[in-house]
Image: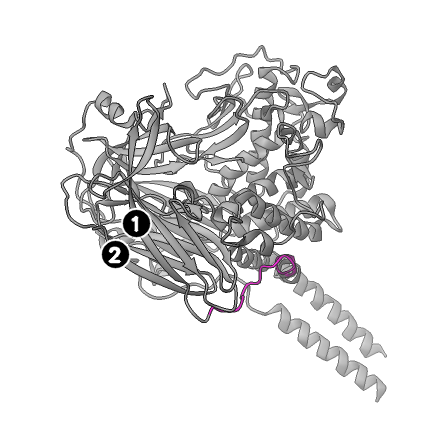
Amino acid sequence: MKRLLVVTFLTLILIVLTLASRSPRPVAEKMTGRSLAHRGEIVAPQSEKKHLDAGTLSALEVADRFIENQKKELGFQKHHSLQSVSFRTPLKTVVKYSVHEGEIPLMGLGFEVEVDGQMQVTKFENNYRPLLPGSGGSASAPEFLLERLSPRYEVVENDPSFMTPIYFASAQAAKPELAYILRVRDRAGARRGPQQIIFRASDGQILSRSRSRSEF
Amino acid sequence: MKSVHIIFLVGCLLLNACTQELAQQCGSADLNLDGLVRLREGTAALSGPKASLVMPNPLDATRSLQALADSPALLNYTALFPLTALSSSSRLENTFIKIRRNSTTQAATVFSGDFDFSPDTAEYAESMAYYSTTAMLLYVEALGFTVNRKRPLYVLTNAPGQYEGDINAYYEHNQFESTLPRIIHLVGDGDFSPAIDRDMYWHEFGHLVNESVTFDRGLDLAGARGAAFTEGSALHECLADYAAESVGNKDFIGKWIARNFDEYDGGKPLRSAIDASASRPTTFTERLLNDGAGKVPERYQVAEICTRVLWEIRSQFTEYEPAKGAVMADRMILSAAGSLPTDASIRDFHQALLGADKQLHCGINQRSIRAAFESRGVKLNPPDLKTPLQFYYKPIGIQEYEDLNGQSLLRQSTFQEADYVYFQIQVSNPNTTTAHNVRVYAESGSPHLLSDVYMQGLGDLAPGQTIQVGLSQGLSVFTYGTSFIMDHAGYSGRPAYQIRVTAENGGESIQAGVLQ
């Protein structure tokens, strides 16, 4: 009787251990739903397994193929091109795509594709809009533009980023405007330190500002 | 009796199989732990150029307040550290990291191939800059993370200050454009120059790492756009401090640079990852509170509490295996950052750490992660607010102008003449529970109101408490206010917008408006 009890007890322990080892792997749940993300939405694709031969592809290739398959549905324009940066972590790879027209980037437009360790696309973020071409916009002389900025901003001299071109489109615009990025110091701001400003190429209007991260 | 033995044997075999499967499923393989430990200790490279350096700085190396950059006794504390992956033996640069003194347009200093300089020289600072940034880069990459090398990183060891006597360090991410370089600015070359302290480089490089491991999503995008405080800004500083502290294997940062400032007694660090002083707050609860009377959360103070949480978690890992445990903790913490959203909160980070632990370590640290946050006042699910926050606001036009002395100033103006629109606001918590992570958003409904400081974090608001942000009352609208840039081109209408106020444990309040 005593032996039977011991055997039963050990058998129960074995069953518990076996069940524990088969519990589902703790990974982030995949989202289901639409295959097309509207601007700014994050969704997981519906049918990535259908068109991805995940076993032999790198995460970047998986993401590239995924984007190629989405382009038509997203209304991706022929005058736009993509540049990618791939970020690997121990848990996943994220490929970020920035949108360019010719050599000039379009500020804020792009895609983000997340690929897990099994080479499955688990997340897709769409920040693309099918904007009209921005080329052909007029630009004023650099001297005029700097004159307009000078009361407020001190230009960091001789910098390679001096007036780097970029296309800027506000949330409601159908067509981007040519703009420049410049590294400056704010003469009047409450917070000092290096800054970047974006200003319109045609008239010098400030369109956006960003600050550096200071230690104190 | 024999059958019991057999069952016991089978049990052991099964248990062994289960453990192996668990380890494999939890993704804890593929780390060269010994190599990582060598990288942490700066002893990875056996050949190639090396620099003579006092590590991490004269004060920490000698533990003496008498140590200065030109102290002859420092010779006894120098050791050789590898200068890995130089493009040539005479310049401290490669395709990614470029060391310069005060400008990105400057040519790299030409060395003779010898990197043995006194700590009070510019060449020493450059050698320290190259070693430090490279060492952190190699360590983070060996942990399994990509550091975005698509743009160069310039490190300026003696960058121009913002004012006479300025001592500081800046990290410039150049978020807007995908071809511009990243820049670390070390400012100030006095007796206690930040440029000869390894921790300054590790902290600033930590900001670049933060952006890479969060995939450039903007861990603190609002801060980059000008917000005075957000929980994301505190997380950015926390992770940068933690990187310097953990890889340096010491629970503080900034003893050397703190000697420049009167408010720090000699030998006290800028920030500590342990509760070193009974007189200073030790919880998020104290640091995040906005009392409406001038006490506002400050990013570095909140970051310090956050590093204490991380240090406690790290201590769980290092208790049995000091060096390897630290590597495992670093990997989990950076992996957690990869789950953070744009403008992340401290609760987001709490949740992300639990998730990373589940994926990497099958969740064996869940209890200690929860305890570390909860003991400092951050619970994942605080009590919900029964009523949304109440607020009143008033937009004001602000115009830039130049006075007779050529000084650039700001003044109030009509909206038709304004360069910017700022929002004065009063936010009240009518509930009997604290409102956590209160945020104010300004959202444009017009192409002529361009996004500027689109969000400000106001911290935690106690029951019945009111916060005011204004021109002449409460917190300064120019520091704590949200704002738009006005674009008048081809427009004379009344642009629309909305102000949104949220709390992490309650609903949101929205008011729409037009500029009259």
Answer few, some or many: residues within 10 Å of disc 2's Cα (few below 14, many 20 plus, some between 14 and 19): some
Task: Inspect the image, locate mark 2, and give the three-letter code of the amino acid beneath it.
Answer: Gly
Q: How is the image coloured?
A: one colour
Local SS, label 2: strand
Answer few, some or many: residues within 10 Å of disc 1's Cα (few below 14, many 20 plus, some between 14 and 19): some
Residue A12, horizontal then vertical, whole percent: 71, 79
User: Does the magenta-highlighted stretch encompass residue A33?
Assistant: no
Task: Inspect the image, locate mark 1, and give the three-letter code of the amino acid beneath it.
Answer: Pro
Q: List the residue tagged with mark 2.
A: B513
Residue B428, horizontal then vertical, whole percent: 43, 61
- Identity of the residue drawn at 41% across and 58% down: B427
* Residue contact at pointers 1 and 2, CB within 8 angstroms: yes
Q: Nearer the viewer, residue B134 or B450?
A: B450
Is residue B268 in view from this perspective? yes
Q: Nearer the viewer, mark 1 or mark 2?
A: 1
Q: List the residue tagged with mark 1.
A: B395
- Decide whether the magenta segment is chiefly helix, strand or loop: loop
C-alpha distance separating marks 1 and 2 = 9 Å
Q: The magenta stretch spans which residues?
A: B371-385
